[in-house]
């Protein structure tokens, strides 16, 4: 039978779970969602703001507390927490999710990504996973197959700075135990970019894993734009100074250019943080567009992130997820990385003192902290394993 005929002759919908409205009510004993809400957090202290290298001319604020988080309530008691979706999406999320089973997380993500946005849907999906873990009494990484109970963290810089300051920062973090350090290359000239890398490499020695992010895949370009030659010359210069990877050296859709660059240089080329379509990842893997993939759970959902990571393993590719959702999003990524043999390193935005990850993690009652060997322990409580500090909640 031809495949087309087979599909046309299917007696039941191929994806019955997507026909959400027609679904029968959950069976007794199944968990049902009874409420969805954003919980505001008190701002304890403003830490300040920094000019991010990837969006020069803008400011990125850092604070202890502030903002909100997502809670999904259930008829059986456990409450799932997630990164906050946009307030505008909450009525749609509430209408869709009420009465549904959070264990159907993989159904909810595609449905909500159409009704709201990928990011909003990802926020809900991570809270559903938190509920799955809480209902089962197990940390998520264990439910997903286990593996690592701690993951190396790399410090992802925010700002551009002088070679001297970046070198001093790298050495200080190295002394604290950090094993990876990511610089931003956004100076007008390649020479200025390379001066920073050289200074850091010289000060930190060869043991520190030094990444470079050119952020050339940003949909809206703010700052200096690279052409192929700049990417190639930069990659060649970096490879002589032991660079761990060069991230996003070309535009997001320039798959041919990225693949060509990969084939021409020995330094690893990484990317993938902007894509939310699994078929694009298939293209990236088949055509060896990158050596290392940086998928993002805020685009793919955590289940999608895990699928990309598993597929990459088939291609023998390492994965280091991008981390765009700070706080609870980082913890969700941490569990996914811990359960994936070909995933290593968790990205922490950490450009202290203002851009410290400790400010983001201060909302947790039990925050995991980078240890003296540079590892972030995976929280061992059920679900995501972190709770919001009650003192932070705005009453
Ligand atoms: Mg990046």
Image (cartoon, helix red, strand yellow):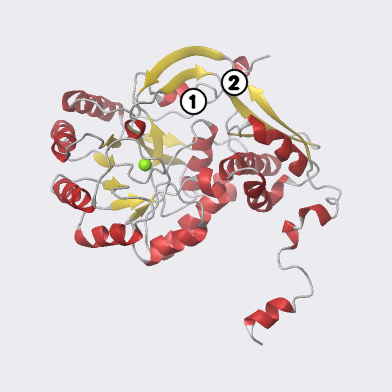
List x then y, in percent, for residue 319. 40, 52
> Quarter of the picture for ligand 1?
top left
List x then y, in percent, for residue 340. 47, 52
Query: First in sequence: mark 2 or mark 1?
Result: 1
Tell me if residue 145 can be seen.
no
Q: In this view, does 249 lie to the left or right of 150?
A: left
Residue at 19% x, 28% y: name it: 167
- Does residue 395 lie above or below 84 as drawn? above
Tell me if residue 259 can be seen.
yes
Residue at 61% x, 33% y: name it: 86
Which one is nearer the viewer's eye here, 297 or 89?
A: 89
Furthest residue toward top = 45
Q: Mark 1 — residue? A: 361
List x then y, in percent, for residue 380. 55, 36
Q: Mark 2 — residue? A: 389
What is the C-alpha distance between the residues marked 2 and 1? Answer: 10 Å
**Quadrant in the picture for the N terminus:** bottom right
List x then y, in percent, for residue 109. 63, 49
Considering the numbered disc 2 on the image, is that residue within a helix, a strand or a loop?
loop
- Does residue 36 lie above or below 104 as drawn? above
Considering the numbered disc 1 on the image, is that residue within a helix, a strand or a loop?
helix
Q: In this view, does 307 lie to the left or right of 106?
A: left
């Amino acid at each position: 039978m031809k495949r087309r005929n087979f599909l046309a002759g299917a007696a039941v919908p191929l994806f019955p779970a997507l026909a959400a409205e027609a679904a029968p009510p959950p069976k007794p004993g199944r968990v049902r969602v009874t409420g969805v809400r954003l919980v505001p957090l008190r701002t304890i202290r403003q830490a300040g703001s920094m000019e991010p290298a990837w969006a020069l001319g803008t400011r990125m604020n850092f604070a202890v507390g502030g903002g909100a988080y997502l809670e999904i309530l259930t008829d059986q008691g456990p409450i799932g927490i997630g990164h906050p979706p946009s307030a505008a999406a909450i009525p749609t999320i509430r209408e869709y999710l009420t009465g549904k089973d959070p264990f159907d997380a993989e159904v909810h993500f595609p449905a909500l990504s159409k009704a709201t946005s990928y990011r909003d849907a990802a926020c809900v999906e991570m809270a559903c996973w938190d509920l799955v873990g809480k209902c089962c009494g197990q940390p998520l990484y264990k439910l997903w197959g286990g593996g690592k109970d701690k993951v190396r963290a790399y410090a992802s810089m925010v700002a551009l700075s002088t070679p001297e300051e970046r070198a001093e920062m790298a050495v200080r973090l190295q002394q604290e135990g950090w094993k990876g350090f990511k610089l931003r290359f956004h100076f007008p000239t390649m020479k200025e970019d390379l001066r920073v890398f050289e200074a850091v490499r010289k000060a930190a020695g060869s043991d520190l894993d030094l990444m470079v992010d050119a952020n050339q895949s940003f949909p809206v370009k703010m700052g200096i734009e690279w052409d192929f030659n700049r990417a190639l010359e930069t990659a060649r210069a970096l490879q002589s100074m032991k660079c761990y990877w060069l991230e996003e050296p070309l535009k997001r859709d320039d798959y041919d250019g990225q693949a060509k660059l990969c084939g021409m240089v020995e330094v690893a080329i990484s990317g993938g943080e902007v894509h939310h379509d699994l078929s694009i990842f298939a293209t990236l893997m088949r055509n060896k567009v990158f050596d290392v993939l940086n998928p993002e759970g805020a685009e793919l959902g955590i289940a999608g992130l895990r699928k990309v990571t598993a597929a990459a393993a088939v291609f023998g590719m390492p994965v280091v997820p991008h981390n765009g959702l700070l706080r609870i999003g980082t913890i969700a990524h941490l569990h996914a990385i811990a359960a994936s043999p070909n995933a290593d390193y968790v990205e922490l935005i950490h450009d202290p003192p203002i851009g410290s990850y400790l400010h983001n993690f201060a909302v947790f009652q039990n925050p995991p902290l980078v240890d003296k060997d540079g590892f972030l322990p995976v929280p061992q409580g059920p679900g995501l394993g972190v709770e919001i500090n009650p003192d932070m909640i705005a009453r």
